[in-house]
Amino acid sequence: MNKLADRLNKLSPSATLAMSQKSQELKAQGIDVINMSVGEPDFNTPDNIKEAAKKAVDDNWSRYSPVPGYPTLRKAIAEKLKRENGLEFTETQISVSNGAKQAVCNAILALVNPGDEVIVPAPYWVSYPEMVKLADGIPVIVSAGIEQNFKITGEQLKAAITPKTKMLILCSPSNPTGSVYTQAELKELADVLAHNPHVYVVADEIYEHINYVGKHQSIAQFTEIRDRVIIVNGVSKAYAMTGWRIGYLAAAEWIVKGCNKLQGQYTSGPCSVSQIASLEAYNGSQEAVENMRQAFLRRRDLIVKLTKEIPGLEVNVPEGAFYLFPKCSSFYGKSYNGNTINNSDDLAMYLLTEAHVATVGGSSFGSPECFRMSYATSDENIIEATRRIKEALAKLQ
């Protein structure tokens, strides 16, 4: 008898973590698997940040931190938002959490009531709809295919809004597509939101610094909706600090207070040493950030070139993050060696078993016609992985 709470029974497991686990199992059997399933920089945390963390340990930063994070870190984040984004926030409008993932979830749980609708553009990060369900909200999926570079339009947003709409979740640069909204595209969305004052925006900007098209554009720049935008960001992607678990949200003070109230009851403040390391990330040299961005750009160009040479895959050019999201539906209905490809999840499993390359099917991202490849790996791995994929897909008849 299943005795788990109903809220757990309606959640789906994370497809990205599941595929990563399967690839680890094959590796444990001695099989050479190239893992392109995980959304994590393959670089090490920069040395200046590691040194700051070591010093924090020696200086006994080992006690509970304030629920919203240390004031010094919140001040550094406010200065970053002013310096890099032209946005004015005070320390009391910032809450530091255990990763950007918790910041997104805090915002949803703090604002969404049972039955409220939350607009989630697809392709979406796998956790967004699940978090909405956790809050007893209703995810409203708005799809944007490869033909529109996986970005929704103002018209699509306008058509999706109802009196029950509470929130829009917007991710730019995007996981899983790498798409980046331009200032003009964001203005189009902001104009629609300006006429719907009951709708809030969670702007997930965790990939802000992995951007190949110039200055990052935040939807919070538009003053008419500014008070309803909750910016989410953190150190994991830009500074190769995924395991340090530091994210933040910046929003109107009443929203931040609500998130702090929530966080105070189920995790309290984030790791003390990680916060001191993050302080150095924001205040120290930014040279490593640019070096990593340039490496990702080089890899982007490489994987796009090689994947475009694979017959049957449709590829766009991502403008940020470190993902490629090829359309693969031309292979549906084809078979090899008793394996029939009915959807992108089947295709991802086929590539794992036949090519020994771990990718993630698009169903969990709300786009069953595509699959996700992370190019946060070496040039050599990208070259070998695409060679294997090309060979495996050629076998399907």
Image: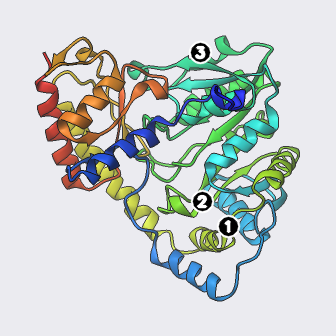
Q: Nearer the viewer, residue 6 or 277?
A: 6
Kindly check if marks 2 and 1 are in contact, taking CB atoms under 8 A apart as contact: yes
Number of numbered discs visible in the structure rendering = 3
Q: In terms of secondary structure, where does tag 1 sit?
A: loop
Q: Nearer the viewer, residue 35 or 295?
A: 35
Q: In terms of secondary structure, where does tag 3 sit?
A: helix
Q: Horizontal and vertical percent for residue 297?
A: 33, 50
* Residue name at image x 50 percent, y 58 percent: 238
Q: What amino acid is labelled 1 in the image?
A: Cys
Q: Nearer the viewer, residue 213 or 281?
A: 281
Specify the quadrant that holds the C terminus.
top left
Specify the quadrant that holds the N terminus.
top right
Q: Nearer the viewer, mark 2 or mark 3?
A: 2
Q: Earlier in the sequence, mark 3 or mark 1?
A: 3
User: Relative to residue 196, is residue 40 drawn left or right?
Assistant: left
Q: Earlier in the sequence, mark 2 or mark 1?
A: 2
Q: Earlier in the sequence, mark 2 or mark 3?
A: 3
Q: Horizontal and vertical percent for residue 182?
A: 52, 35
* Residue name at image x 32 percent, y 47 percent: 25
Q: Which residue is mark 2?
A: 245
Q: What amino acid is labelled 3 in the image?
A: Gln
In the image, farthest residue toward the bottom: 58
User: Relative to residue 233, is residue 106 drawn left or right?
Assistant: right
Q: Horizontal and vertical percent for residue 45?
A: 46, 69
User: Relative to residue 50, is residue 203 drawn left or right?
Assistant: right
The quarter holding residue 167 reads top right
Q: Horizontal and vertical percent for residue 85?
A: 63, 52
Q: Which residue is mark 3?
A: 156
Label 3 environment density (alpha carbons within 10 Å; few <14, some 14–19, many ≥20)? some
